[in-house]
Amino acid sequence: MSGQEFFHAGERVGVLTTQPLDRVLDYRAPEGGCFRGAYVEVPLGPRRVLGVVWGPGQGDFDSAKLRAVNRVLDIAPMRDEMRQFLSRAAAYTLTPLTMMLRLATRAPGLSDPVSMRKILRRGPSEPERMTDARARVLAALEEYAGLAFTPKELSDLAGVTPSVIKGLVKQGALREEEAPRDLPYPKLDPERPSKTLTADQAEAAAVLAQAVQSGTYGTTLLKGVTGSGKTEVYLEAVAACLRAGRQALVLLPEIALTAEFLTRVEVRFGATPAEWHSGATMTERRRIWRMVGQGAAQLVIGARSSLFLPFQNLGLIIVDEEHDTSYKQEEGVLYNARDMAVLRANMCSAQVVLASATPSLESWVNAEVGKYRRLDLASRYGAAVLPEMRAIDMRVEKLAPATWISPTLRSAMGKRLERGEQSLLFLNRRGFAPVTICRACGNQVACDHCDARMVEHRFQNRLMCHQCGETKPLPTVCPSCEVEGKMAPVGPGIERLGEEAALVFPEARIAVLSSDLFGSARALKERISEIVKGEADIILGTQLVAKGHNFPLLTLVGVIDADLGLQGSDLRAAERTFQLMRQVAGRAGRAEKPGEALLQSFQPEHPVIRAILSGDEEGFWKAEAAERQAAGVPPYGRMAGIILSGPDLPTVFDLGNALARNDGPLRAIGAQVYGPAPAPIARIRGRHRVRLLVKAAKGVPLQDAISRWIAPCRLKGELRLNVDIDPQNFF
Ligand SMILES: Nc1ncnc2c1ncn2[C@@H]1O[C@H](COP(=O)(O)OP(=O)(O)OP(=O)(O)O)[C@@H](O)[C@H]1O
Ligand SMILES: [Zn+2]
């Protein structure tokens, strides 16, 4: 860490803590001094808290009262580029810097000393008496010459009891040593053979490899149809990064996708990489955090928060399925991991690869205007061809009441069953039925705390609110008119569709894939790998299945309600539907057998449905871009959402009106405010929600204006104000 500023003992330093104070606090540098960026423990009131030495102190605090830093932690100091990244990300998202630091230190036990554990090696002496068990232990050590083991590993390996091991230690045949508990990750070998790339793939891989070798910043949109080998191509960029001795990060939108991906990494590089996600244990998290910081993890596969790991030498970030909405964090710090990846790469001279078959309009436009490089993979790998896509006109199909699988779709599924191929039915609705209605009075069961109807989950035999998670038993008596036995489900959810499929095809093996039906990510992963092996004939899934899975036996995709996403007023409704339908359809026909995708629709002539079917992607993006440009909305204009919430509606509205009246700072940059208006979901968890929308031209200092605009707000009591820069969801 030479080159980094050093503060001598007693000098005034500014420390950023993870406490919600929103400023850097002054302390005295501890005995022995500290570098800028050092992770430290400082006294704060009666407590000791984690912090980072951010720079020289401000000097505005009485130096007689100044307290000293307790100690410097045994962790490499935060790099300048990381401090800049956090500062820039905080400024962009209008988030207090202390909250950003919290994101960057989300690992347990950082302030604990490096924890050690006992390991065993071959010692200098021979055992006094050789027994079979003892001989097995020594043979095992010989076989793995040079390696050390924990006592448990060694007794398992040799198949002996712990007492045998203890005896050998006593006699000096085994030697005990202390070693750090957190071990480096196994080395990945980029020189192992890759798959033989097609000419297109090889060309794209070469461009990416060269970009990585340049050691500079750059972003590439890797657009390739589903099944074209985007993953194979970007793994070669990872190889180039590893060869250059730098670290790589691969972001995946869904942890259910990691199992398949980890296997592919292992095949390509000979070992598994570090895996960072919400399901990781505390021990795993601490190990990854520390090893990433020491450069002892070369590749991390992770969810969006892995962008905040303390990489020592990050050279490449892959954002797979870059259009995926789950990259936008919608709670706490509101950030879009795709945009933050670009920012982070900028700070550390790394390359970014945004991979997708259906990019976000933002990225498509950035490539169009030359801000991003663009690489295209136009055809599927090998014999696989893109599925044929057709609409099923639901206005002419004859369906029995409370059924949703049309005769046309049913007969297509029947053919797959006969041929031993798989069908996938897609319906983006969790639960059994979206609405429960009383047939006597028409009352729909709603959540007591939210502006939302409760969804029946028959599997759990309860009604559930998808906003707040509240559940209650299915009522037999109407809560409104008190008539008994008239409550009925209306509309299909994925579970109900499962029942229908089982009735129509009683002999078929049916798998329902919905995130809430699995107790753990592991259970879901296992189910998916069973399906890959062919242990299901009909798969029913919510949007979970649209993402990146490879089901080789799948040749038919049926979309139950292709119109579902088109109804919203969301500015991205068309874009989302287009992406989702093309992605789902892309699950079919990924191996030798050709696939077919059938979209059930009541409006097959709708321009978006027509664009999906025709496959004229560039035409769709161009039309969509022109429309957004004319309306001055993203990506051609900028937007910010302000969500005000509180238990008392008039108070929330008063604040909204006050903001709308005092919009001087916004007018100064030519921005407009819309609202206040009740948010589309007007109540969540008992809190009323009111929103304002700010629209501005591109290139104006929007964040700065917004901070000046909201600065005078006094948030009394339980009133909350959240700013969402570049909102993705208007809920
Ligand atoms: N050059 C190649 N040699 C052998 N197999 C290949 C090659 N390219 C692609 N494949 C195989 O084709 C399948 C699809 O490739 P891959 O998953 O990389 O595509 P993708 O573009 O990432 O797909 P999606 O967008 O649907 O996630 C995989 O099983 C992959 O192993
Ligand atoms: Zn609720």
Image (tube, rainbow, N blue to C red):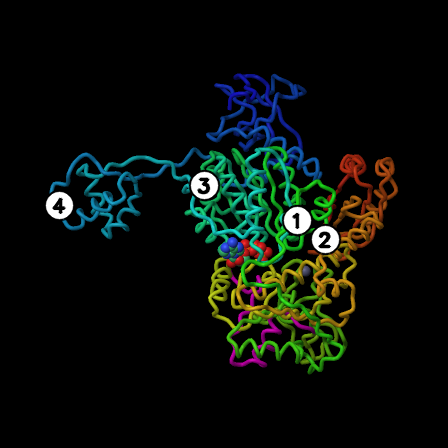
Label 3 belongs to which residue?
Answer: 287
Q: Quadrant of the C terminus?
A: bottom right
Location of ligand 2 given as a quarter of the image = bottom right
Q: Amino acid at mark 2?
A: Asn
Residue at the spot of label 4: 130
Q: Is residue 677 above or below residue 465?
A: above
User: In the rendered image of this protein, does residue 182 appear above or below residue 586?
Assistant: above
Q: Which residue is mark 1?
A: 328
Disc 1 under 8 Å from ligand 1? The reply is no
Q: Amino acid at mark 1?
A: Lys
- Considering every residue shown, the one lying at the far front of the view is 199
* Disc 4 residue type (three-letter): Met
Residue type at the position of mark 3 = Arg
Residue 518 in magenta?
yes
Q: Earlier in the sequence, mark 3 or mark 4?
A: 4
- Whether label 2 touches label 1, CB < 8 Å: yes
Depth order, front residue of 193/60: 193
Q: Secondary structure at mark 1?
A: loop
Which residue is the site of mark 2?
Answer: 729
Q: Is residue 256 visible?
A: no
Q: Secondary structure at mark 3?
A: helix
Mark pair 2, 1: CA separation: 9 Å
Question: Residue at horizontal 55%, vertical 48%?
Answer: 202
Q: CA distance from mark 1 to mark 4?
A: 63 Å
Instruction: Tell whether 113 sits left or right of 463.
Output: left
